[in-house]
Amino acid sequence: MDMEPAVRGSGGVGAAHGHGSSASACFSGGVLVDGPRTQQLLLHCAAALESNDVTLAQQAMWVLNNIASSQGDPNQRLTSWLLRALVARAWRRLCAPAGASVACLESGAPAPPRGRGRAMSVTELADYVDLTPWHRFGFTASNAAILRAVAGRAAVHVVDLSVTHCMQWPTLIDILSKRPGGAPALRITVPSVRPAVPPLLAVSSEELGLRLANFATSRGVQLEFNVVESAATAATSPKKKKQPTPCQELASVLSDPPSLGLRDGEALIVNCQSWLRHVAPDSRDFFLDTVRTLNPCLVTVTDEDADLDSPSLASRMAGCFNFHWILLDALDMSAPRDSPRRLEQEAAIGRKIESVISEDGGERSESGARLAERMRQREFASVGFDEEAAAEVRRLLGEHATGWGVKREDDMLVLTWKGHGAVFTSAWVPS
């Protein structure tokens, strides 16, 4: 696409929408600016940044700024977040290293996103998680697989690798309390390290464990909760400036069975909820090999069903454009645009986009199909979900907007929005 006509014809402001059920577009100076054209502008800007072409990037940003709106429809909001990420990347890669002033980005684009969000109370976190089924879907599907795997077992040990601060476990505890023959003894182990991503909690893991233990006691379930410091963190001298990465810390936790306190006779569950995408792509095989050496009776993996780990910035931009509209569109039907809970979720989406577009490393998700291939290569076998699990997910979705659905892909369950895959959950055993 030739940039010049787009620049000459971009004198107005309008909406770009190409994903949702209602089609909308804007005429900017007589030029139709629709979803595909917006995507092409974003891709041109990404390509310009990859080739260090500041002038072309600046032109594209100027046009995109006439399309984007942080208060507009879902596609305008998505474009706004993508543009912010491009501006942040341009500043980091082209301007700041060269000592240039911010004038090199005089595109009128919004400022890059800052901060990682505020820390929530436990009640606020529950409201955050309940706004859409984005997280609860994985909780529900994984819990169903866990319940099948531990049927009849007297002791269960869950190693919880998640970013949602144990919000999955009250429901599991409640179900276990009603198990015929009595509830098993339950242990939950969490690592002291977690990715520095939303949602953030204003309560320590230890305090959270005490609250869970009190809840379990009220349900007649014996719960032991442990927070394990990684060997990498413990071994790091205060004099050393270079700290281990979250991936390195996580791997060290799982590769040290004594720190996990594994016990004979326990059914070991490794639960990965929105976690694997925070492990560096070139370290994921090592991470899974480490999980396998623990010989768990079940591994559950839930993550976003998108391939955003390409080395090409343009490819990652296309992936973000085609994926992140899903939750933005769903939020438009779930809460008013000025709702604090919605704004916090949108800010979390913006942070993910910034991680993928403007930063090297960070969150790089891979689709469920690619994850399944990786798991099989690491000698795991998939475990299918029964109809009862699917029915439980459908009951959950019945509490939310009508656009949500669930489908089966091989042995996975996939959360969908208007037919588009959003989040997958899969279950695995060492083969």
Image (cartoon, helix red, strand yellow):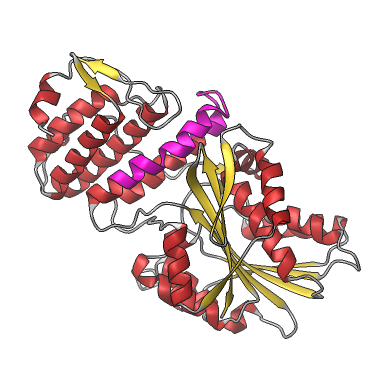
Q: Nearer the viewer, residue 84 or 29?
A: 29
The residue segment tinted magenta is: 318-343
Residue 48 percent across, percent down from the top left: 13, 43
Q: Is residue 104 magenta?
A: no
Q: Residue at x 35, y 50 (%)?
A: 355
Q: Is residue 324 magenta?
A: yes
Q: Residue at x 33, y 50 (%)?
A: 356
Residue 37 percent across, percent down from the top left: 24, 30
Q: Residue at x 34, y 24 (%)?
A: 69
Q: Nearer the viewer, residue 364 or 118?
A: 364
Residue 206 percent across, percent down from the top left: 66, 61
Which quadrant would the N terminus be assigned to in this image?
A: top left
Q: Residue at x 85, y 66 (%)?
A: 183
**With respect to residue 99, does 307 lie above or below?**
below
Query: In this view of the protein, can residue 103 be seen by the observer?
Result: no
Give the quarter of the image for residue 350.
Answer: top left
Which quadrant would the C terminus be assigned to in this image?
A: bottom right
Residue 15 percent across, percent down from the top left: 33, 21
